[in-house]
Amino acid sequence: MVKELSKQRKDTVFTRYFNLSFPVDSVYRWTQVVKYAGKSLDNDQYLLRTKVYKIDNETGKLYKWTESSRTLLDKKGKKEKYVSRILLKDGSVQEYKNDKGKKSMVCIDNKGNKINDKGCLLYTHSKFPLHKMETISDLIKQQLTNVVYSYSGRLPSYLLVNLEADYATKKWYVSFEFSKGYAVNQNIYLDLVTSVLSALGSVKLEDYHFNKDIKGNYYNHMFGLPITFVNSK
């Protein structure tokens, strides 16, 4: 996106809506809002600032979750500087930087002091235990494959299932990303949602399903299950 905006060399402000990570129109159900602000700088540089706001599933209110900036340092966009900050519950910030390939990750407290060089959130420096979700993941993939193949017509080349464990409500939330150019109809979509939630009904949400910061605060955690349809038409 930032490279296309850089080619246009114009200042711009726009907003996009998402259901988890799936882009949707503002009139449909969405879980987060992303606000973009692009600005043309001197010396053929271009800056894109992004702010992500999520809906608190308990209160229904919006809160700012992340903010980032991406600066293209040359006209072709081969050199860039990227900074991303996750805003945590007690005022701490997890900050990631990539300055022309030099990467860093730090955890900063609410007074601006650096706490460590590995980040504030557990699953930033530790791997999510995917092996604990292997059985249910295989079940979901099989059920969704059966749903897709039960419909006639062109099949998607792939389907990405986004699963989010919500700490406040202790519920699962699901969304889908389809291969580019595939237009999913409402009947298939509803069957896919029903199939996933049915499978997840047997999964008790446990501590490891959620992310956690170094102060012990819990956060939603999302992971994806990719499914490829080899015999797509």
Image (spheres, helix red, strand yellow):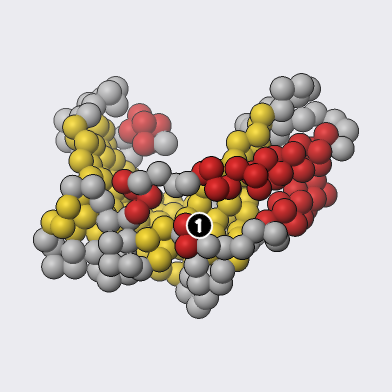
Quadrant in the picture for the C terminus: top right
Who is closer to the viewer here, 19 or 195? Answer: 195
Residue sitting at x 72%, y 53%? 199
Residue sitting at x 18%, y 47%? 117
Q: Is residue 5 left or right of residue 188?
A: left
| Residue located beneath label 1 in the image | 209
Q: Position of residue 29 (x, y in %)?
A: 63, 61
Q: Is residue 107 visible?
A: yes
Relative to 197, residue 170 above or below = below
Q: Is residue 7 left or right of residue 100?
A: right
Residue sitting at x 35%, y 68%? 217
Relative to 16, residue 31 above or below = below
Q: Is residue 122 left or right of residue 104?
A: right
Q: Secondary structure at mark 1?
A: helix
Relative to 24, residue 53 above or below = below
Relative to 87, residue 196 above or below = above
- Amino acid of disc 1: His
How packed mark 1 is, by other alpha carbons closer than 10 Å (few <14, some 14-19, many 20 or more), is many
Please, which residue is most extreme toward the left here?
Answer: 113
Residue sitting at x 26%, y 40%? 82
Who is closer to the viewer here, 138 or 164? Answer: 138
Q: Position of residue 38 (x, y in %)?
A: 32, 45
Q: Position of residue 165 (x, y in %)?
A: 54, 59
Q: Position of residue 115 (x, y in %)?
A: 16, 57
Q: Is residue 192 left or right of residue 13?
A: right
Quadrant in the picture for the N terminus: top left
Q: Is residue 178 visible?
A: no
Please, which residue is most extreme toward the bottom here?
Answer: 59
